[in-house]
Amino acid sequence: MAVGRVHLRRLCGRHGTDIFLLSDRRRALYWGSILGNKGSGWLTAWLNLIGLVTVLGAINIGTWTFFLGAFGAQLGLEATFNEQLIFMIVITASQALVNHLGIKLTSILTDFSGYLILFGSVALAVALFAFAPSYDFSRLWTFANYSGDVGGGVWPQTESIGLLFALGLLLPIYTITGYDASAHTSEETVKAAVNVPKSMISSVWWSGVFGWLFLVAVVIAIPNMDAAAGQGWSVFFWTLNEVLPGPLKFVLLLIILAAQYLCGLATVTSVSRMIFAFSRDGGLPGSNALKKVSTTYRTPVAAIWTGSVLAVLFTAYTPLYTTIVSVTVIFLFLSFTVPIALGLMAFGKTWTVMGPWNIGGWYRVFAVLSIVAMVLIFFIGIQPPNDKALWITVGFLVLTAIVWFGFERKRFQGPPIGAEIEKLAAAIKQAEQAVGETR
């Protein structure tokens, strides 16, 4: 435990981004515990952990899907389950190895990925606008039913445009699960109590604006909507093949592939730090092993490889990309919803002291809307072809009950408070001195 914090202090001093991946995830445990009890705190953290493991699987399966669509034909790949599994093992193992060997390279690559994503997105949008064969902006407010065969079999045949629209929300909902990234650096942010929530809202706003502009570029560049819909999941690659010059398309595809890989790399960091932090508080079976940090590499090696292996196993059982995304969205938003619902019950009663970012009585309105949104997310997440997500969700919830009642209910004491914090601080100082660290 103490050695682990030595590692974290090194991160804070040299590579601040990574430490807050841990601190934010651990903060979920505190929110759930303070607003409810140690059981609700544990549940919040556990659901978040499931969401992080499955989101790692979703990212890397998404990378496989993109790699297959971009370069599969040239490499003679046939989109078999075995090819997907091998790719998943190789890419996840490589990301875990980079994390295993130390935070320095991981931090450099993660920081670089932000610039790469920004540059790649802008370059692709500009290229699509520039080479678009026409500019039919009426497409932006015209709806057509492309379910069934006319839509390449992406969604089952239905006459409900509303249902199709809701199903289409799955992927943007999935991408916005990282809106809390601004909280990762809260401990090094000036006036964090105001600037962090402000930045979280800003991130949603600007992501929505620029994400919409990017999608507009793709829709406008499509040569023919009916022909594009018939391509199904290959519509993006078909559009690029039809519109962009070969060399430019190749460079842009490489940039996107690299960005996806780096996203998975950062997620391995995130899930491993969640496992490490949760184990440090005694919240997981095998916590004593999972909370250890390598004295050579200063990384939580067991947590890194445990999270990576679990992600691979999950995708081996659930190979369909949209189903993986559905499960990810359900559990991540469940972990967000638990403390929100607890806050709704405690607001104005046991929770009366608010921070400087205070929306007053509007909290109740937004809390109710958040809970309603969770119900909607669950509903659309288990619709065909992702109906398997229902049974996976039920299975994970059964596992949750087994772990809590069978292992953690009596052992887990909740986050450390009072004298426990002082005891931990003294152990940290002693461990730092033992390895030559100075404050």
Image (cartoon, rainbow, N blue to C red):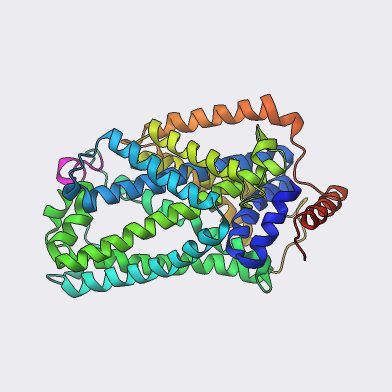
Count of numbered tags: 0
Tell me where the magenta segment starts and ends, as one range. 147-155
- 108 vs 278, left or right, is left
Q: Visible in this render: residue 357?
A: no
User: Which residue shows up at 77% across the image and 60% down it?
Assistant: 353
Foreground of the two, 351 or 43: 43
Q: Visible in this render: residue 22?
A: yes
Foreground of the two, 145 or 122: 122
**What percent of the width, then of the height, locates residue 383?**
35, 37
Quadrant position of the C terminus in the picture: bottom right
Figure quadrant of residue 334? top right
**What percent of the width, then of the height, locates residue 329?**
46, 45
**What percent of the width, then of the height, locates residue 122?**
33, 72
Up-down relation of residue 412 to residue 269 (above or below): above
User: Which residue shows up at 26% across the image and 74% down it?
Assistant: 126
Q: Is residue 253 magenta?
A: no
User: Which residue shows up at 67% across the image and 53% down it?
Assistant: 27
Q: Is residue 149 magenta?
A: yes
- 183 vs 224, left or right, is right
- 235 vs 403, left or right, is left
Up-down relation of residue 120 to residue 335 (above or below): below
- 114 vs 422, left or right, is left
**What percent of the width, then of the height, locates residue 401?**
61, 28
